[in-house]
Amino acid sequence: AWLNSGECAFESACRAEQLLRLMAKLGADGHNFLPDAISFLTCLNCFEKAVSEERKDGSLIVDHVDGLIDLAEETGAAGDDLTRFFNTAISIIVKSGVEDTEQRTRELMSRMEELRESGTLNLQPISDNTKASILNQAILRSDTANEAEQLVLDIIENHLANTETNAIVSDSISIGKLIHSILQRNGRTNVEKVDELLTKMERAAEEAPGIAPHWSHFNMAIASYAKINDDRSAFDALELLRRQEQCFEAGNSRSIPDSYAYCSVLTQLAKNAKNKNNKKAGINEMAHDVLMMMVRQVEQGNTRVNPSTIDYNIVIGLHANARKRSATDKAMYLFRIMQAEKEAGNSNIPDVVTMSSLLN
C-alpha cells in the first residue's frame, strides 16, 4: 500500500521500512511470521521509486538500503531466494550517484558471493545483466576522458581474465559510448588516447576475440583525426584505416571497414592539399592508394565498401592538381574504371566534376 500510495515516495519508503522492521521484531519475539523475499523486495522498491522520481539525497537512501540488507541477513527472509532483492539494491546504489558508487557495488557483490557460498542466504550467482548495469551507469557518470579511458582498460582486462566475478562486462555499444566520451573533448591528445586504446584492443583480440575493436570504434577515431585538420591528421587517419583492414583480415569480423572510414580519409587528404602551409608531396598518390584499398575490399566481397562518384572525383581532382604526367595517367585510369562501372549499370558514373578535373 505504501509503495502505491501516491504520497511522497521517500516518506512512503520510510513508513514501509518501519512496518518491515516491526514484522522482523514480532517474528523474533516468537510470533508465527517473518518478513519474506516479497516483504523485503517491496520495501526496497519504495526506495527505488524515491531515488528515481524525487532525486532524493542519494547517500541518505543508500544508508536505508544498507540497513535493509543487514536486516535481511539477520532474519534470513524465511529462506526465500533474495537474488532480486540484492540486484535491486545494487540498482539503487548505482542510480543514487553517491561518490563511492563503484566501491559500494563491488563490496555488495562480494558480500552476495560470500552469503551464497556460506549458505547464509538463498542467492543465485550474480547475473551478467547486473554487471552490465553497473558498467553502463559508470559510463554515464564518466566526467573526464581519463575516467572513460580507464573503464575501457578495465573492460580489456576483464576479457583477458574472463572471470565470472568481475563487475565489468561489455559490448561494442558500451565501449563505443566510452570512446565517444573521450572524443567529445576535442584535441589531438584525446584522439591519440583512443588510438592507443584501439591498439590495446587489437592486441588483446589475439587472445580474446570478443574484445576486437568494432568498425564503429574505428570510424569515430578516423573521423576525429580528420576534424583536427592539421598537417598530420590525414596521415594518422590513413594509418589507423590500414590497421582496421589488418584487424578485419586477421579474422575479426567486428572490424569490417565501411565506406565512411575511407571517405573521411579522402576528404581530409583533399583539405590538406589545399592548405598552403602543408608542403607534403604525394598527397594525390596517398589518395589513390585509399581508393584502391576500397576497390580491393569490394573485390574481396566486402559489400559495406562501395566507392562513390564523389570518392573518384576527389582522387581525380588531386591528380589533376599535381600537374604531373604520371598523375594524369592515373586520373585517366580511374576515369576508365568509372566508365566501366557505368556500362555495368552501377551508379558510379562520371559527372561534370569528373570531366572538369580531367580537362584541367
Image (spheres, rainbow, N blue to C red):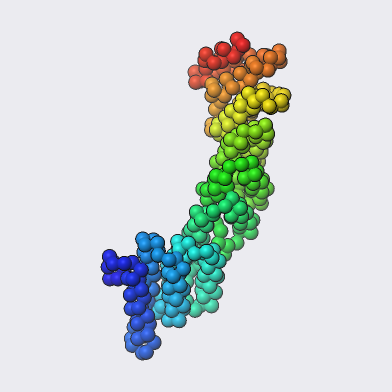
Regarding residue 300, the answer to whether it shows in the image is: no
**Residue placed farthest to the bottom in the image?**
30
Which of the 4 image quadrants contains residue 295?
top right
The N terminus lies in quadrant: bottom left
Residue in view at x 62 percent, y 21 percent: 315
Q: Position of residue 353 (x, y in %)?
A: 54, 16
**Residue placed farthest to the front in the image?**
277
Regarding residue 77, the answer to whether it shows in the image is: yes
The C terminus lies in quadrant: top right
- Is residue 39 depicted above or below 275 in this figure? below
Q: Position of residue 317 (x, y in %)?
A: 61, 18
Residue in view at x 30 percent, y 71 percent: 2
Which of the 4 image quadrants contains residue 275?
top right
Residue in view at x 54 percent, y 74 percent: 114
Q: Position of residue 262 (x, y in %)?
A: 59, 31
Q: How many marks?
A: 0
- Is residue 241 depicted above or below 322 in this figure? below
- Is residue 321 depicted above or below 210 in this figure? above
Residue in view at x 57 percent, y 24 percent: 311
Q: Is residue 148 left or right of residue 246?
A: left
Q: Is residue 23 left or right of residue 349?
A: left
Q: Position of residue 176 (x, y in %)?
A: 54, 46
Q: Nearer the viewer, residue 164 or 200?
A: 200
Which of the 4 image quadrants contains residue 163?
bottom right
Q: Is residue 104 left or right of residue 315?
A: left
Q: Nearer the viewer, residue 240 or 307?
A: 240
- Is residue 307 depicted above or below 6 in this figure? above
